[in-house]
Image (spheres, grey):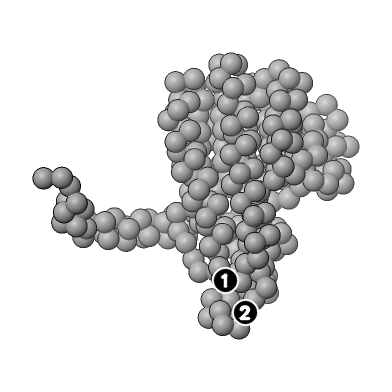
């Protein structure tokens, strides 16, 4: 049975690949972009099943408007995918206030507004699925990527809480944690702070952003396929890690975190009222 999907940021990366595969299989996609020219291929080929909406997810009222109009127009939306976002690289001291505020408004607040605005409609229609595109960087932190990690750690906490709030309404929530993939996230859309020589020791990310030093291992088409397949799983998986390197690194970091916590048994108990 064909589904209707609302996906933010469909002009490139996972959003583009998800939209491509869904339209090819006959589903309907409401896709948000900031520039419709970047998705003219969808607009021209799928006149009846691709609904292009202009949206900057950093604009909260506009997010709410698009969600409302989309549910009213299409009657029911089966899946909402919060995908729009970007990477910001640079040590904390190198970041401008404008860069900090914008990535929070896009990656974190924008995702929160999209999910929050969708919940009442999904609850009233009897259920649905929310998918948040995060990153294994929502569990593992590296230097010179502090604000990206702040937004991903933050949205994961939000989604994990919301999943518990709405499960009784047949609304499933899945956090997708991809590893490095060959998308514009690395090779086009990533933002870099004004670099300072004092932090040259953490500027190794510049090689990662340059394709001549090797491409990321993740296949965006296969990742998109696994995300689409997850919608038919019941109950919804809370988390999906995509990429063997991402999974290995995440498990290693979590084990380190647990080991550190386990050393604190005496300290934690020492503050209990006796």
The quarter holding residue 19 reads top right
N-terminal label among 2 and 1: 1
Residue depicted at 72% across the width and 42% down the height: 59
Q: Where does label 2 land, which residue? A: 196
Answer yes or no: is residue 183 visible: no
Quadrant into which the N terminus falls: top right
Q: Is residue 99 above or below residue 111?
A: below
Q: Which secondary structure lies at badge 1?
A: helix
Judged left or right of residue 98, residue 251 is left
Q: Is residue 272 or residue 111 the one in the foreground?
A: 272
Residue depicted at 16% across the width and 54% down the height: 270
Residue 76, position in %: x, y?
Answer: 67, 20
Q: Residue furthest bottom?
A: 197
Q: Is residue 41 above or below residue 258?
A: above
Q: Is residue 163 above or below residue 210?
A: above
Residue depicted at 32% across the width and 61% down the height: 256
Q: Is residue 181 above or below residue 127?
A: below
Residue 32, position in %: x, y?
Answer: 75, 39
Q: Which secondary structure lies at badge 2?
A: loop
Answer yes or no: is residue 90 visible: yes
Q: Where does label 1 land, which residue? A: 93
């Amino acid at each position: 049975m064909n589904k209707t999907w609302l996906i933010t940021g469909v002009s490139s990366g996972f959003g583009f690949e998800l939209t491509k595969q869904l339209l090819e299989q006959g589903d309907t996609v409401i896709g948000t972009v900031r520039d419709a020219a970047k998705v003219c291929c969808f607009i021209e080929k799928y006149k009846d099943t691709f609904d292009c909406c202009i949206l900057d997810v950093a604009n909260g009222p506009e997010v709410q408007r698009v969600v409302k109009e989309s549910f009213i127009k299409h009657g029911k939306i089966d899946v909402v995918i919060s995908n729009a976002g970007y990477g910001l690289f640079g040590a904390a001291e190198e970041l401008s206030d404008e860069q900090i505020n914008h990535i929070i408004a896009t990656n974190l607040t924008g995702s929160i507004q999209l999910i929050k605005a969708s919940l009442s409609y999904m609850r009233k229609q009897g259920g649905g699925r929310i998918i948040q595109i995060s990153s294994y960087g929502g569990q593992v932190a590296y230097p010179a990527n502090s604000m990206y990690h702040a937004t991903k750690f933050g949205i994961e906490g939000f989604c994990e809480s919301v999943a518990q709030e709405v499960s009784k309404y047949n609304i499933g929530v899945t956090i997708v944690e991809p590893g490095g993939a060959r998308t514009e996230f690395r090779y086009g859309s990533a933002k870099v702070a004004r670099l300072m020589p004092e932090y040259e020791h953490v500027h190794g990310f510049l090689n990662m952003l340059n394709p001549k030093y090797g491409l990321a291992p993740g296949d965006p088409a296969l990742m998109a396929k696994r995300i689409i397949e997850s919608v038919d799983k019941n109950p919804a998986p809370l988390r999906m890690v995509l990429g063997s390197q991402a999974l290995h690194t995440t498990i290693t970091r979590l084990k380190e975190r647990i080991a550190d916590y386990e050393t604190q048994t005496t300290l934690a108990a020492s503050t209990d009222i006796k």
